[in-house]
Image (cartoon, rainbow, N blue to C red):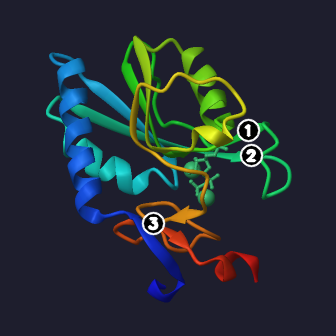
């Protein structure tokens, strides 16, 4: 696995530090309230696990799985819910937790879908953001790191379902994804 890595882009230490900062900001904003974090499977799993332990207000969690129709390399913009939430979010303070925003199509769809379910409030947090790739407008409340348009893996993010368990975010050697 490690021989496939080109360069560590965000170290384990830097991730820890940023997650802790985000946790403090979220704790301030939701002071005196309960927060429902919704993780977008599967990529957000690692980030959300660390993030919820960095927040001091009471947290509930749920997960949603979505997939884009169409070719696997370019997102079509049509999103399908593969696994829906277990519970209603009506009247709750909800935060959608993502690992990365690329075109923004997944989050745009989920944001609009969740808005219609009448939460008390709805916000978005993403560990990583690639603004160069954005296709739709999106208001992101919290971002961990803005990154260039490079092929990255680790800390939940996969290439062909691999590398999610790397404790850092790294770029892959080109020969790994071109062969
Ligand atoms: C990736 C990533 C985001 C989404 C971002 O998920 O984790 O959820 O794509 O892309 P977008 O902004 O262009 O919509 P993926 O569909 O690969 O599923 P996974 O989380 O299970 O890896
Ligand atoms: Mn994902
Ligand atoms: Mg993926």
Q: Could you tell whether 59 is left or right of 145 in the image?
A: left
Residue 154: image tag: 3
Q: Can residue 39 be seen in this view?
A: yes
Pinpoint residue 125: horizontal percent, then vertical percent: 42, 34
**Real-space Cα separation, disc 3 to disc 2, in angstroms:** 21 Å
Cβ–Cβ under 8 Å for marks 1 and 2: yes
Q: In this view, does 42 lie above or below 3?
A: above
Q: Earlier in the sequence, mark 1 or mark 2?
A: 2
144 or 91, which is in the foreground? Answer: 144
The residue carrying mark 1 has its beta carbon less than 8 Å from ligand 1: yes
Q: In this view, does 32 lie above or below 110?
A: above
* Residue 14 point in image, percent of width and height: 26, 56
Q: Does the residue labelled 2 lie within 8 Å of ligand 1?
A: yes
Between 81 and 96, the residue placed more toward the observer is 96
- Binning the other alpha carbons within 10 Å of mark 1 as few (below 14), some (14 to 19) or many (20 upward) gives some
Q: Name the residue under label 1.
A: 79
Q: Residue 167 carries which label?
A: none
How many marks are shown on the rendered structure? 3
């Amino acid at each position: 696995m490690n021989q496939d890595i080109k360069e560590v882009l965000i170290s384990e230490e830097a991730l820890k530090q940023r997650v802790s900062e985000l946790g403090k900001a979220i704790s301030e904003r939701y002071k005196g309230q309960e927060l429902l974090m919704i993780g977008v499977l599967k990529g957000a799993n690692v980030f959300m696990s660390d993030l919820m332990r960095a927040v001091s207000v009471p947290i509930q969690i749920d997960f949603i799985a979505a997939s884009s129709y169409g070719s696997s390399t370019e997102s079509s913009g049509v999103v399908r819910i593969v696994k829906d939430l277990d519970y209603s979010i009506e009247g709750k303070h909800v935060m959608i937790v993502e690992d990365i925003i690329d075109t923004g199509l997944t989050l745009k769809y989920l944001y609009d879908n969740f808005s219609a379910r009448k939460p008390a409030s709805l916000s978005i947090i993403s560990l990583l953001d690639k603004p160069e790739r954005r296709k739709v407008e999106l208001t992101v409340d919290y971002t961990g790191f803005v990154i260039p348009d490079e092929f990255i893996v680790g800390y939940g993010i996969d290439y062909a379902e691999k590398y999610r368990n790397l404790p850092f975010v790294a770029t892959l050697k080109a020969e790994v994804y071109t062969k």
